[in-house]
Image (cartoon, rainbow, N blue to C red):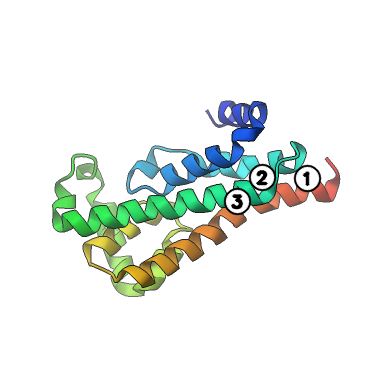
Amino acid sequence: MAREALGFVEAHRHYAPFIAFLLAFGESLAVISLLVPATVILVGMGPLIAAGGLGFLPVWAGATLGAALGDTVSYWVGRYFKDRVRSFPILRNHLDMLDKGERFFRRHGVWSVFLGRFFGPLRAVVPLVAGMFEMPRLPFQLANVGSAALWAFVLLAPGSAAMKLFGW
C-alpha cells in the first residue's frame, strides 16, 4: 500500500503538499491513526521531495498543518464527549491504550502532547485525553503545533537531505 501511495505522489507531484496534509491528518486523528499507515509514506516522501524537484517547504507545511489539525479535532472530541469517549465503538477494543494515554498525560501534562506525537500508540490518544481533562487551549495548541512542525520535519528531512547529499 505504501509503495502504491508513493507511486501516486511521484506521478502527481503537484498534489504532494495536499497528500502530506491528508496523511498527517489521518495519522494524528484519534484512534483512526491506527488504521492509516501514514508514517511510512511520509518518510518515503522525503526522497521524492529531492528527487522529484518538489519544494520541501510546501510539503513540510502540508504535513505540519495536517498533523496539527488532526490533534485539534481529537482534542475537541475529547473535550466535548469527555468520559463518554470510552463508550465509542471504535475505542471499545482499545481501552487499554486510552488508559496508557491517561497515565502518560497525568504524568507529563502539557509535555505529553508534545512527546506523545513521537510515539505511535500515544499519538493516537493523548490529544483526546487532553481534551477529556480540559487542558487549557493555548498550552495545548502551542505543544500541538510545535510538535507537529518538528514531527513533520523529522519524517521528511532525512530522506530529502540524503538524496541531495549523495546526488541521487
Residue pushed farthest right? 167
Q: Which mark is residue 163?
A: 1
SS at badge 1: helix
Residue at which label 3 appears: 60
The amino acid on which the numbered mark 3 sits, given as a three-letter code, is Trp
Left/right placement of residue 6 relative to residue 79 reads right
The amino acid on which the numbered mark 2 sits, given as a three-letter code, is Gly
Ranked by sequence position, the earlier of labels 1 and 3 is: 3
At 25% from the left and 52% from the top, the residue drawn is 77
Where residue 122 appears, as percent x and y from the top left, is: 38, 56
At 17% from the left and 58% from the top, the residue drawn is 82
Q: CA distance from mark 2 to mark 3?
A: 10 Å
Instruction: Report the front residue among 79 and 97.
Output: 79
Residue at which label 2 appears: 46
Front tag of 2 and 3: 3
Cβ atoms at labels 2 and 3 below 8 Å apart: no
Residue 102 visible in the snapshot: yes
